[in-house]
Amino acid sequence: MKRIILARHGESEFNAKGIIQGHIDTDLTPRGIVQGHLLALDIKKRFQVERVISSDLRRAYRTAHIVGDTLDLEIEKDHRIREMYFGKWEGKSYKEIFEKNRRDFENWLRNPIKYPLPSQEDIEKFLSRLSDFLDYILKLNEREILIVGHGGSIQGLLCISLNIGLENLWAFKHTNASYSVISFENNKFFLKELNNNSHLEKLEKKENPLM
Protein backbone atom coordinates (compact mmCIF):
# COMPACT_ATOMS: atom_id res chain seq x y z
CA MET A 1 0.00 0.00 0.00
CA LYS A 2 1.14 3.51 -0.81
CA ARG A 3 -0.15 6.47 1.18
CA ILE A 4 -0.12 10.00 -0.26
CA ILE A 5 -0.71 13.07 1.91
CA LEU A 6 -1.88 16.08 -0.10
CA ALA A 7 -1.28 19.31 1.82
CA ARG A 8 -2.12 22.85 0.83
CA HIS A 9 0.35 25.64 1.58
CA GLY A 10 -0.06 27.95 4.58
CA GLU A 11 -1.70 31.35 4.33
CA SER A 12 -0.01 33.52 1.70
CA GLU A 13 0.14 37.28 1.33
CA PHE A 14 -2.55 37.22 -1.36
CA ASN A 15 -4.73 34.78 0.63
CA ALA A 16 -4.76 37.30 3.45
CA LYS A 17 -5.75 40.10 1.05
CA GLY A 18 -8.39 38.11 -0.83
CA ILE A 19 -6.54 38.24 -4.16
CA ILE A 20 -6.48 35.51 -6.81
CA GLN A 21 -2.95 34.12 -7.15
CA GLY A 22 -2.51 31.28 -9.62
CA HIS A 23 1.07 31.54 -10.87
CA ILE A 24 1.80 34.82 -9.06
CA ASP A 25 4.61 33.88 -6.67
CA THR A 26 3.65 35.22 -3.24
CA ASP A 27 5.22 34.33 0.10
CA LEU A 28 3.71 33.11 3.38
CA THR A 29 2.36 35.51 5.98
CA PRO A 30 3.51 35.16 9.61
CA ARG A 31 0.25 33.29 10.21
CA GLY A 32 1.06 31.01 7.28
CA ILE A 33 4.44 30.21 8.80
CA VAL A 34 2.81 29.20 12.10
CA GLN A 35 0.32 27.07 10.15
CA GLY A 36 3.27 25.38 8.45
CA HIS A 37 4.82 24.49 11.80
CA LEU A 38 1.53 23.09 13.09
CA LEU A 39 1.17 21.05 9.91
CA ALA A 40 4.71 19.75 10.35
CA LEU A 41 4.10 18.64 13.93
CA ASP A 42 0.90 16.84 12.95
CA ILE A 43 2.50 15.08 9.98
CA LYS A 44 5.41 13.95 12.16
CA LYS A 45 3.04 12.63 14.81
CA ARG A 46 0.69 10.76 12.49
CA PHE A 47 2.75 9.53 9.55
CA GLN A 48 6.09 8.04 8.56
CA VAL A 49 6.76 10.28 5.57
CA GLU A 50 9.76 9.21 3.51
CA ARG A 51 9.66 11.84 0.79
CA VAL A 52 8.41 15.44 0.45
CA ILE A 53 7.57 16.94 -2.94
CA SER A 54 6.50 20.55 -3.37
CA SER A 55 5.22 22.90 -6.01
CA ASP A 56 7.95 25.24 -7.20
CA LEU A 57 5.95 28.31 -6.13
CA ARG A 58 7.27 30.01 -3.01
CA ARG A 59 4.19 29.72 -0.78
CA ALA A 60 4.13 25.94 -1.21
CA TYR A 61 7.89 25.43 -1.14
CA ARG A 62 8.31 27.40 2.07
CA THR A 63 5.53 25.39 3.71
CA ALA A 64 7.19 22.18 2.54
CA HIS A 65 10.55 23.38 3.82
CA ILE A 66 9.10 23.90 7.31
CA VAL A 67 7.76 20.35 7.26
CA GLY A 68 10.96 18.97 5.78
CA ASP A 69 13.06 20.56 8.52
CA THR A 70 10.84 18.92 11.14
CA LEU A 71 11.07 15.53 9.43
CA ASP A 72 14.75 15.93 8.51
CA LEU A 73 13.95 15.42 4.83
CA GLU A 74 15.08 17.28 1.72
CA ILE A 75 12.42 18.90 -0.48
CA GLU A 76 11.96 17.96 -4.11
CA LYS A 77 10.47 20.71 -6.30
CA ASP A 78 8.10 19.82 -9.12
CA HIS A 79 6.48 22.41 -11.40
CA ARG A 80 3.73 19.97 -12.40
CA ILE A 81 1.90 20.56 -9.11
CA ARG A 82 1.94 24.34 -9.20
CA GLU A 83 -1.43 26.08 -9.13
CA MET A 84 -3.60 26.39 -12.23
CA TYR A 85 -2.92 29.53 -14.26
CA PHE A 86 -6.01 31.73 -13.92
CA GLY A 87 -5.25 34.08 -16.79
CA LYS A 88 -6.50 37.66 -16.65
CA TRP A 89 -8.07 37.15 -13.24
CA GLU A 90 -4.72 36.68 -11.50
CA GLY A 91 -3.93 39.65 -9.27
CA LYS A 92 -7.58 40.70 -9.01
CA SER A 93 -9.44 40.69 -5.72
CA TYR A 94 -12.39 38.40 -5.13
CA LYS A 95 -14.39 41.52 -4.29
CA GLU A 96 -13.70 42.96 -7.75
CA ILE A 97 -14.58 39.66 -9.42
CA PHE A 98 -17.85 39.38 -7.46
CA GLU A 99 -18.80 42.94 -8.43
CA LYS A 100 -17.95 42.70 -12.14
CA ASN A 101 -18.05 39.01 -13.08
CA ARG A 102 -20.06 37.22 -10.42
CA ARG A 103 -22.03 34.99 -12.78
CA ASP A 104 -18.91 33.96 -14.73
CA PHE A 105 -17.12 33.16 -11.47
CA GLU A 106 -20.01 31.11 -10.09
CA ASN A 107 -20.32 29.18 -13.37
CA TRP A 108 -16.59 28.45 -13.33
CA LEU A 109 -16.77 27.15 -9.77
CA ARG A 110 -19.70 24.96 -10.79
CA ASN A 111 -17.94 23.50 -13.84
CA PRO A 112 -14.48 24.81 -14.90
CA ILE A 113 -14.51 22.63 -18.01
CA LYS A 114 -17.78 24.00 -19.38
CA TYR A 115 -17.16 27.58 -18.22
CA PRO A 116 -13.40 28.31 -18.37
CA LEU A 117 -11.99 31.66 -17.29
CA PRO A 118 -10.73 34.13 -19.91
CA SER A 119 -7.18 33.08 -20.93
CA GLN A 120 -6.85 30.50 -18.15
CA GLU A 121 -4.57 27.47 -18.48
CA ASP A 122 -5.99 24.95 -20.92
CA ILE A 123 -7.83 22.39 -18.82
CA GLU A 124 -6.39 19.48 -20.84
CA LYS A 125 -2.84 20.69 -20.17
CA PHE A 126 -3.68 21.05 -16.49
CA LEU A 127 -5.05 17.50 -16.49
CA SER A 128 -1.99 16.22 -18.35
CA ARG A 129 0.61 17.66 -15.99
CA LEU A 130 -1.22 16.43 -12.90
CA SER A 131 -1.74 12.98 -14.42
CA ASP A 132 1.96 12.78 -15.32
CA PHE A 133 2.84 13.71 -11.77
CA LEU A 134 0.51 11.11 -10.27
CA ASP A 135 2.02 8.42 -12.51
CA TYR A 136 5.46 9.51 -11.30
CA ILE A 137 4.39 9.20 -7.66
CA LEU A 138 3.13 5.66 -8.17
CA LYS A 139 6.51 4.60 -9.58
CA LEU A 140 8.42 5.80 -6.51
CA ASN A 141 9.58 3.23 -3.97
CA GLU A 142 8.57 5.23 -0.90
CA ARG A 143 5.40 4.10 0.86
CA GLU A 144 4.41 7.43 2.44
CA ILE A 145 4.83 10.63 0.45
CA LEU A 146 3.86 14.19 1.33
CA ILE A 147 2.82 16.50 -1.51
CA VAL A 148 2.63 20.24 -0.79
CA GLY A 149 0.66 22.12 -3.41
CA HIS A 150 -2.28 24.45 -3.93
CA GLY A 151 -6.06 24.30 -3.78
CA GLY A 152 -6.40 23.68 -7.50
CA SER A 153 -3.54 21.22 -7.92
CA ILE A 154 -4.41 19.17 -4.83
CA GLN A 155 -8.08 19.00 -5.76
CA GLY A 156 -7.11 18.15 -9.32
CA LEU A 157 -5.07 15.21 -8.05
CA LEU A 158 -8.08 14.09 -6.01
CA CYS A 159 -10.39 14.29 -9.04
CA ILE A 160 -7.95 12.27 -11.15
CA SER A 161 -7.17 9.63 -8.54
CA LEU A 162 -10.84 9.16 -7.63
CA ASN A 163 -11.90 9.25 -11.29
CA ILE A 164 -14.59 11.89 -10.83
CA GLY A 165 -13.59 14.37 -13.54
CA LEU A 166 -12.17 17.90 -13.36
CA GLU A 167 -15.65 19.38 -13.70
CA ASN A 168 -15.74 18.68 -9.95
CA LEU A 169 -12.46 20.51 -9.29
CA TRP A 170 -14.03 23.07 -6.96
CA ALA A 171 -16.48 20.67 -5.31
CA PHE A 172 -13.70 20.02 -2.79
CA LYS A 173 -12.29 22.61 -0.44
CA HIS A 174 -8.84 22.77 1.12
CA THR A 175 -8.17 25.47 3.67
CA ASN A 176 -4.63 26.75 4.22
CA ALA A 177 -2.27 24.11 5.68
CA SER A 178 -4.98 21.43 5.65
CA TYR A 179 -4.43 18.04 4.06
CA SER A 180 -6.20 15.08 2.51
CA VAL A 181 -4.98 11.49 2.42
CA ILE A 182 -5.37 8.96 -0.36
CA SER A 183 -4.08 5.40 -0.47
CA PHE A 184 -3.24 3.22 -3.44
CA GLU A 185 -4.12 -0.41 -2.81
CA ASN A 186 -4.70 -3.27 -5.26
CA ASN A 187 -4.34 -0.88 -8.21
CA LYS A 188 -7.04 1.44 -6.91
CA PHE A 189 -7.12 4.77 -5.05
CA PHE A 190 -9.11 5.28 -1.87
CA LEU A 191 -9.91 8.55 -0.12
CA LYS A 192 -9.01 8.25 3.58
CA GLU A 193 -9.21 11.85 4.80
CA LEU A 194 -10.47 15.11 3.30
CA ASN A 195 -9.42 18.64 4.29
CA ASN A 196 -8.10 17.66 7.72
CA ASN A 197 -7.34 20.90 9.57
CA SER A 198 -7.80 19.73 13.16
CA HIS A 199 -4.14 20.56 13.88
CA LEU A 200 -4.97 24.26 13.40
CA GLU A 201 -7.67 24.45 16.07
CA LYS A 202 -5.49 26.21 18.65
CA LEU A 203 -4.53 28.84 16.10
CA GLU A 204 -8.18 29.46 15.24
CA LYS A 205 -8.97 29.80 18.95
CA LYS A 206 -6.06 32.28 19.28
CA GLU A 207 -4.32 30.13 21.90
CA ASN A 208 -0.55 29.68 21.84
CA PRO A 209 -0.50 27.11 19.02
CA LEU A 210 3.00 25.77 19.62
CA MET A 211 2.48 24.83 23.28
Image (cartoon, grey):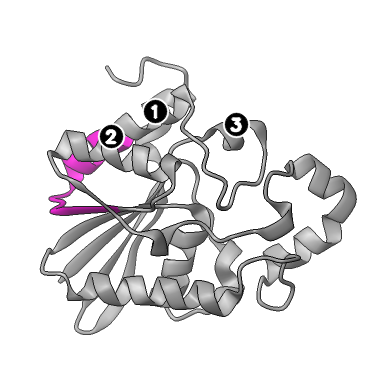
Q: Residue 66 carries which label?
A: 2
Q: Can residue 9 be seen in this view?
A: no
Q: Are marks 1 and 2 in contact (CB under 8 Å)?
A: yes
Residue closer to the observer: 207 or 86: 86
Q: Nearer the viewer, residue 74 or 193?
A: 74
The magenta region covers: 39-53
Q: Which amino acid, by three-letter code, is at mark 3?
A: Ala
Q: Name the residue under label 3.
A: 16
Could you say which quadrant of the image residue 167 lies in?
Answer: bottom right
C-alpha separation, residue under disc 3 versus residue under disc 2: 20 Å
Percent position of residue 160, x then y: 43, 76
Q: Residue at x 29, y 20 (%)?
A: 210
Classify residue 131 by image quadrant: bottom left
Q: Name the residue under label 1.
A: 33
Instruction: Look at the numbered disc 2 and give the secondary structure of its residue.
Output: helix
Q: How many residues crowd mark 3 within 10 Å: few (<14), some (14–19), many (20+)? A: few
Q: Which of marks 3 and 1 is nearer the N terminus?
A: 3
Q: Which amino acid does label 1 sit on?
A: Ile
Q: Quadrant of residue 30?
A: top left
